[in-house]
Every structure is written in C-alpha cells, then in structure tokens.
C-alpha cells in the first residue's frame, strides 16, 4: 500500500549499510524486561490452573498448574534469553532468524496468559477451550486475510474485505434458508464475495479509481444494501428468509479425541477444513507455481510482467475476484456456523482485523494465518476474561489487536513491506 | 504513463518519472486554472494527460455536470431498489401483461413516495414549513467539520480514514470539560472547544508522526486508531469519572448550560456550531489557496519528492496536516456533544466519521464542495428518519445512495458512457486518462 509515499521515508534509528537493524533486538529486549517486571516481580501470587482436557474426554490429562510469580519469572528469563540471542546475532552482523520473533510472541502471550489467569478472581481456565474457541473465531479472519493477500500480491489494495465478509454472510443466510441447503449457501456466499470484488476490480482497473476509495465506499455500499434488504425482506419474515440451514461440525473419528490439537484440526465444519486447505493452496500457489510467480510479478513490477507477455489487468481482475470469493466463504461462517441467522453489521469490523492480520503476516498466507489466529485468540480471551474476572478491563484486551497492528506497520516489530505495485493502477503505454 | 499521447513527441525512455511528476506539481499548483484534484496527482492512477477541448466539452465533461448526473443515477438506482422490495410492485408485477399500467403506477409511487418523504423530512413540508431544513443544517454541522478534515488530508496526499476516532476523542475530552468543570459562561464553552480540538489534533498527529517517522501507512493506522478510540470511550464511560452519579448505564452527565453552543433559532436544534462550520470552511479555503503552508500541503500531496527538493519539510508538513485534520474533525466532535446531543454516549460519533469520507469525496476535497456535500448528506440523514417513519423504507437506503453517488463521481467515464457522452470509442483509454485530469483526477 504505497499510495502516498513513493520515496521510502527515512527509517528511524541507526541503520548502517552492513549491520542489520537494531529494531528487533531492542524491541525484544524491552518487551522481555516488561515481562520480567510485570509478569515476574509484580506477578500475582496465586497459582494459575490451565485445564488441558475436559471431563469426559477420551484422553483425560491432568491440568497444568503454574505459580503466578515463579512462572512469570521463569518465562521472562526465557524471553530474556531469546532477546540476548538476538543481540548476539546482531553483534555478529547477522539478522535474527524469522522464527525468533514468532517464538518470542508465543512465549510472551503465554506469560501474559499466566499473569492474567493467576490474577483473576477464579484462577482457572480451560486451555483446550480457549484455543479451540480462538480457532473458531479466527476462521473468518483467515479467509478475509487470504483474500487480502491474493489482492495485494497482485497489486490491488483490498480495503473492501469487510464488505466481502458482510456480503457473504448475508447471501449465505438468504440462500441457505431459501434452498434449505447450507452448501448451496456457502457457494452463494463465495459468489457474493466475488461480485463485490468484481466491482472493486472494474472500478480500480478499468476506471482507474483509487483503490482505497473504492474499497471504503464498497464497504458502505454493502453495509447499506444488506441493511436495507435485512429491513425489508428478512426481518418481516424471518422463517422464510433468515433461518439458514447449518454447516454441521464433522469430527474425524479418533483424531478429534487428541487433546488440544484434536478439536482444532479434526473437529471442524466443512468451512473450517476448507480454511486449512485454502491456506495451503494459496501458499503453494503463490510461491511454488508458475501462476504464483506471474501474480507476484504483476504485483511487484507490472511493467516487467507486461513486457514478458503477462496480461497485467486480466491477471489482476481474476485474482481480485478469486480473493473476493474466498472472503465471501469467510463471511458465510458467521451465518452458517457461529450464529444461526443474519443481523445487521454481523461482521462487526472483522474485515479490518483481517486487513491487519495480512499486514502483520507480511503479505504471506501462512503469516496471515498465524496473525489471524493471534487475533482470534485476543477476541476469545476478551470474552473469557469477562467471565473469570480480571484486573485488566476487557476494553484494553479488545484494543490489543489494533495496537499490535499499529506497532507492526510502524516497523517496530520488524519491517513490513507491501508488494511494490500494490495500490497503483497499471496503464499500458 | 501515457503522457506521450498528448505531449510533443518525447522519447519515452528519456521522460523520467520525476519529470512527469514535476509536471504534476505544476498542474496541481497552476492557480485557479484547474479544478483542484480530489486526491493529489501522484497518489492517483499514475497517469497524467493534459486538459484539452472546447468550452462546451469542458462543461459537459466537467465536474459539476458529472456530479449532478451521478447524484441522479444514484437516486434512480436507489429508487429501483426500494421499488424491488415493495409489496405493491411485486403484486402488480404478477399481472403485468394483463394491466401494465397498474405495475407502472405502483413502481412510480414506490420510487417517489420514499424520496418525497425524504425531501419533506429534510427541506420543506407544508406542515412545518422550512423547519426541517434547520434540522438538516444541524445534522450537517459535524459532517462538514469532519469532512473538511478528511478533505484537507486528501489534498496533502493522505487518506484520513480516522475522522471517526478523532471525533470520539475530541467529544470525550470536550464533554468531560463540559460536565466535570464548572466555569463562567463564555470561558466554559471556549475551554470545551479547546479541549476537544486538542484531543482531535493529538489523535490525528499520532498518525502523521508515525507516517513521517516510520512510513506506516496512514490508512491502516487510522482504521486501527478508530477502534482504539472506540474501546477507550467504552472503557471511560464505565468509570466513575464519566458516569452519571448513581447510574450504571454508560452515559455521561449532561453538559453544563454554560458549556454548550447557544441555540441559533428557537424551536430548532440549530446551534452556533453551524456558523463555526461555515467559518472553518472559509478558513480551510484560505489556508489551502492563500497561505504558504497550504501551498506546501498541496505540493507534498502532488509530489513529496519534488516538494522536498523545493525545500518543503515533508515530515513536518505530514504531521501538521494530520494534526489540523484531527482538529477539524475535533470540531465535529464538539458540535455533537456541545451542540446536538449535549451528553456523551458510546454512540456519540454515530457514523459521522465514515460519512465524512464520502462527504469529502463528493465535495472533491475542496472546502466549499465539502460544505455543500455535507449539507446534502445532512439532508439525507435528517430526512431518512422521517422517511422510515412515514414509508417504512429502512434508513440504510441512504447509505446505498451515498456510496453510489461517490462511486459514480469517482468514475466519470462510467457516467458519461451511461449517457452516451464519451468521445469516440477508439480513444477510450485516452479519454479515461483525460477525464482523470479534466475532473481533477477524481480517482
């Protein structure tokens, strides 16, 4: 998304030609010190109980017990070690490996969890439920951010993810009710998402309208359309138009009984399984196939791609359309899996979170997937915190994904670089 | 880059991007000869032709005419949408071939009834005279203020999607000063305004700072800050400091009488904030067209690299313009808490921040254009309430019409092709490029 700044802004901080940036070591160091002080020394004295399996599961495992303060200190020391490793690499003039910030984030989030749970009124939480719930909440985000990845990789900024999700949710509810078939609803949702995307593509590719403007306006348009049709068609006759058939949860025998991993991987609806397939397909497609190479070429340097005989605008059009279809499926999750009917603004800003996930995941399908999981976790934690009662107001937990994203785009958590031609229309000439 | 069509033959290889962009700066700053661009040329399609053609063509191709057509087409499409869900239309369509006149009259009445109610709720009706117009002006006040903020940032090449957050923060601070402190008559209102404007400006300046220092894209940062502001307000409204004493619902005490804008016309909600909005519009016009700093803003918007070469401090300009945009949105927040609502609630900003983006786009980012676009959308908002009561048409139709208007205005070639105004098929690509400039590159 380089609409306004052609020349790269001067990066802050000392960067020399030879040494890699100090940003990663410094931010890891600061965060681990924060963890040491708040989660460790000022940590709660109670013991956090994390239940790994529910009663009655096929495999019952004992709960994990972690003392609030001791556990906090131990985890903080682990974080400090990782930060020190990063500094060591920096002093040798090497970049930190990609896995380091991810591992750091996982440990940090776990330390945060221990701190929150041990400080709660009721210091007990079902880890399995927490993680399974996070994945459920993350499914629409994953589809939305995959849509964003496909669009931005081909050079079209997709601010309209929110509209695609909402359009998909509405169409899925309507069609699944009328046809009494959830799978037809799912297909219709994909078509609706693709339709929204086509408008985006036509306006931004044929009429050269600024993509961000089209995206913003499309969100309003879809919100208005679905709201209007909800008011005139769905609300007066809910039985006939807004009681969609449901996508059943299809557990895979035996595998779904594995603690923690089982419910995540093997106890999903069709759409849930589709999510894993989609992430894998988009990743392989983008980075291992000829099609992906072309897509990325169009997104990075359309002129070069054109010279090599790739039809830039057609590639863009079909990719954006495909992206919309994927986001539409994500929208269907709301009405066919999580909630049993459509309501106005059912997507509630998830499209923007998906946008954030895609940036946080650095325009990579797997990165976007992991970031979506993180944001899904934050959503879920927020609702669970309300139940177990914590000192942290839930609103601040709710802010977390947004703040993390701001830090991410500001480059405080590593560099984020969008595809070079993202947001710039291509005019052959 | 298709500039070679309209320029003297130049070896395309020699014509560097910088040269084209330098030409853009000249274009954008050529004084009154050109319509100012909606969004600076460098952030547009990357395509700059040069306006040519007769006076007649420039009128037909020009902004005002296309905007009118866009509004017309959007209203017709909205009408079709209303009619398509109307039971009478559906019933008469059943025997369309037997008696087509029934169907057509039902269609016409469905399409017009809602718009008549909209008009009566926003401009004039026989019962109340022109008093709905006063309500329209009241509703338009925050839209104009926030729209000016969005427009100003557009002109400097920044997409300020964050008016919503800026309004929320300013309304929060302003309202707090209004109900928690008790000051003398004139001073109190001034303090409320200053608090709110500082809040909005700070919320905007953060975006400018991040953009200038780290290159963080302002669209992402503003969207995220909108949510942060929303949750912050939600949190504050649940604290003792902001809640009404003895009340658990998240609503603040009423602002002191000394802290609110005085009423302009008895019997209406119209308040001094509207005149403030008029003054702000004039002020932004002066800033953009007559002041050095406004010139710098436009230069940065047209081409940051050229502006830097010319000695403009781009970083400072970015921070400053975002702070000013936030301050303008802040006036919108103040108009809400100290004018229209007089209390702080979670929904104080409603959809104003998002509507203000469409207002600025419809107004083509000129101050007075934004002003009248704000009045139009204010009329939609005010009239929609009456429309829903009288005809049962959901308010959401307003969103549809608004977004269609902006979509059509942003794509003049589309509107022209609907009305068969396009100059020749062969030159379609060229025409699109030309239109981009003739309309100020409303991309």
Image (tube, coloured by chain):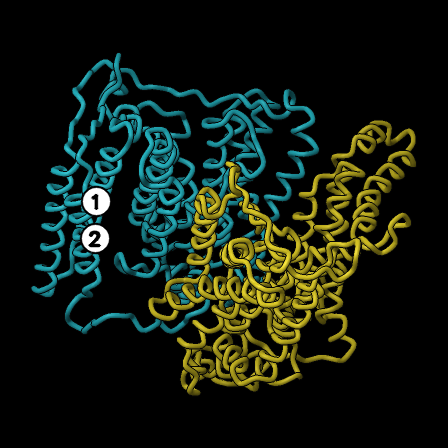
Chain colours: A cyan, B yellow
Kindly state the secondary structure of the residue where label 1 is placed.
Answer: helix
Q: Is residue B130 left or right of residue A191?
A: right
- Report the front residue among B106 and B434: B106
Whole-number angstrom distance, CA of label 1 to CA of label 2 = 8 Å
Residue A212 in view here: no
Q: Which one is nearer the viewer's eye here, B429 or B99?
A: B99
* Label 2 element class: helix
Q: Is residue B311 above or below residue B63?
A: below
First of labels 1, 2 by sequence position: 2
Q: Is B1 situated left or right of A294 in this image?
A: right
> In this picture, is A28 found above or below B390?
below
Q: Mark 1, chain letter? A: A
Q: Is residue A123 visible?
A: yes
Residue at 65% over, 48% down:
B399
Q: Observer-nearest residue: A15 or B131?
A: B131
**Residue highlighted by disc 2:** A31
Q: Residue B148 at x, y = what percent? A: 60, 67
Q: Kindly identify which numbered label has been placed on residue A108.
A: 1
Residue A146 percent location from the top left of the image: 39, 44
Give the mark count: 2
Kindly check if marks 1 and 2 are in contact, taking CB atoms under 8 A apart as contact. Answer: yes
Q: Quadrant of residue B291?
A: bottom right
Chain letter for mark 2, please. Answer: A
| Placement of the N terminus of chain A among the 4 image quadrants | bottom left
Q: Residues within 10 Å of mark 1 (few under 14, many from 20)?
A: many
* Residue B69: numbered disc: none
């Amino acid at each position: 998304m380089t609409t306004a700044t052609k020349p790269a802004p001067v990066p802050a901080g000392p960067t020399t030609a030879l040494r890699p940036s100090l940003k990663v070591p410094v931010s890891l160091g600061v965060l681990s010190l924060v963890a040491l002080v708040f989660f460790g020394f000022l940590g709660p004295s109670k013991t956090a109980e994390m239940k790994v399996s529910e009663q009655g599961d096929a495999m019952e495992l004992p709960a994990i017990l972690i003392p609030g303060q001791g556990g906090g200190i131990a985890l903080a020391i682990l974080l400090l070690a990782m930060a020190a490793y990063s500094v060591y690499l920096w002093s040798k003039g090497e970049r930190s490996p990609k896995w380091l910030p991810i591992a750091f984030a996982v440990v940090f989030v776990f330390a945060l969890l221990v701190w929150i749970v041990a400080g709660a009124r009721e210091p007990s939480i079902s880890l399995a439920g927490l993680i399974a719930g996070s994945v459920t909440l993350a499914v629409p985000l994953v589809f939305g951010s995959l849509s964003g990845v496909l669009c931005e990789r081909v050079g079209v900024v997709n601010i309209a993810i929110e509209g695609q999700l909402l359009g998909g949710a509405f169409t899925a509810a309507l069609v699944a009710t009328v046809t009494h078939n959830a799978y037809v609803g799912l297909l219709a949702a994909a078509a609706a998402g693709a339709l929204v995307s086509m408008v985006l593509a036509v306006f931004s590719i044929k009429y050269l309208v600024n993509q961000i403007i089209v995206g913003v306006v499309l969100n309003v348009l879809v919100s208005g359309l679905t709201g209007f049709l909800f008011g005139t068609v769905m609300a007066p006759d809910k039985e006939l138009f807004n009681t969609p058939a449901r996508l059943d949860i299809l557990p895979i025998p035996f595998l779904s009984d594995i603690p923690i991993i089982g419910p995540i991987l093997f106890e999903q609806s069709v759409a849930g399984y589709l999510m894993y397939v989609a992430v894998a397909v988009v990743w392989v497609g983008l980075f291992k196939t000829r099609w992906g190479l072309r897509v990325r070429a169009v997104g990075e340097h359309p002129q070069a791609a054109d010279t090599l005989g790739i039809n830039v605008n057609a590639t863009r059009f079909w990719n954006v359309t495909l992206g919309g279809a994927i986001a539409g499926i994500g929208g269907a999750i709301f009405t066919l899996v999580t909630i049993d009917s459509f309501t106005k603004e059912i997507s509630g800003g998830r499209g923007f979170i998906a946008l954030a996930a895609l940036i946080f995941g650095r325009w990579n399908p797997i990165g976007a997937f992991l970031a979506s999981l993180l944001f899904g976790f934050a959503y879920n934690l927020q609702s669970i915190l309300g139940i177990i009662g914590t000192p942290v107001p839930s609103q601040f937990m709710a802010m977390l994904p947004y703040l993390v994203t701001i830090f991410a785009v500001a480059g405080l958590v590593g560099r984020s670089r969008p595809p070079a031609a993202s947001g710039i229309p291509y005019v052959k000439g | 880059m298709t500039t070679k069509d309209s320029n003297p033959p130049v070896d395309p290889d020699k014509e560097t991007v910088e040269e084209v962009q330098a030409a853009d700066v000249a274009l954008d700053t050529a004084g009154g000869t050109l319509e100012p661009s909606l969004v600076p040329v460098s952030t547009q399609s990357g395509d700059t032709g040069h306006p040519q053609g007769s006076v007649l063509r420039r009128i037909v191709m020009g902004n005002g005419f296309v905007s009118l057509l866009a509004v017309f087409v959007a209203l017709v499409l909205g009408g079709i949408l209303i009619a398509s869900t109307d039971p009478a239309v559906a019933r008469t369509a059943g025997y369309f071939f037997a008696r087509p006149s029934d169907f057509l009259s039902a269609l016409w009445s469905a399409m017009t009834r809602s718009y008549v109610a909209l008009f009566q709720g926003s401009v004039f009706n026989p019962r109340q005279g022109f008093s709905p117009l006063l309500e329209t002006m009241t509703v338009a006040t925050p839209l104009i203020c926030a729209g000016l903020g969005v427009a100003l940032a557009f002109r400097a090449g920044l997409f300020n999607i964050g008016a919503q957050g800026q309004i929320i923060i300013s309304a929060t601070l302003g309202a707090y000063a209004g109900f928690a402190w008790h000051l003398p008559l004139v001073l109190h209102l001034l303090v409320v305004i200053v608090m709110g404007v500082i809040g909005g400006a700070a919320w905007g300046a953060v975006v400018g700072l991040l953009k200038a220092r780290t290159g963080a894209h302002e669209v992402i940062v503003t969207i995220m800050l909108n949510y942060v502001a929303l949750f912050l307000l939600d949190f504050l409204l649940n604290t003792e400091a902001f809640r009404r004493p003895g009340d658990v619902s998240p609503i603040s005490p009423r602002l002191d009488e000394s802290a609110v804008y005085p009423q302009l016309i008895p019997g209406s909600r119209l308040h001094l904030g509207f005149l403030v909005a008029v003054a702000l519009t004039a002020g932004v016009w002066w800033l953009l067209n007559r002041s050095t700093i406004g010139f710098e803003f436009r230069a940065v918007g047209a081409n940051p690299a050229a502006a830097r070469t010319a000695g403009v401090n781009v970083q400072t300009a970015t921070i400053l313009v975002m702070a000013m945009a936030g301050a303008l949105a802040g006036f919108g927040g103040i108009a809400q808490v100290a004018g229209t609502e007089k209390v702080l609630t979670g929904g104080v900003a409603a959809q104003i921040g998002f509507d203000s983006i469409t207002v600025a786009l419809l107004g083509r980012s000129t101050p007075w254009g934004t002003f009248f676009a704000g009045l139009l959308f204010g009329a939609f908002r005010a009239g929609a309430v009456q429309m829903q009561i009288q005809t049962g048409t959901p308010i959401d139709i307003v969103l549809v019409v608004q977004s269609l208007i902006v979509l059509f205005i942003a794509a003049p070639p589309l509107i022209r092709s609907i009305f068969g105004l396009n100059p020749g098929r062969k030159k379609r690509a060229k025409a699109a490029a030309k239109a981009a400039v003739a309309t100020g590159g409303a991309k």
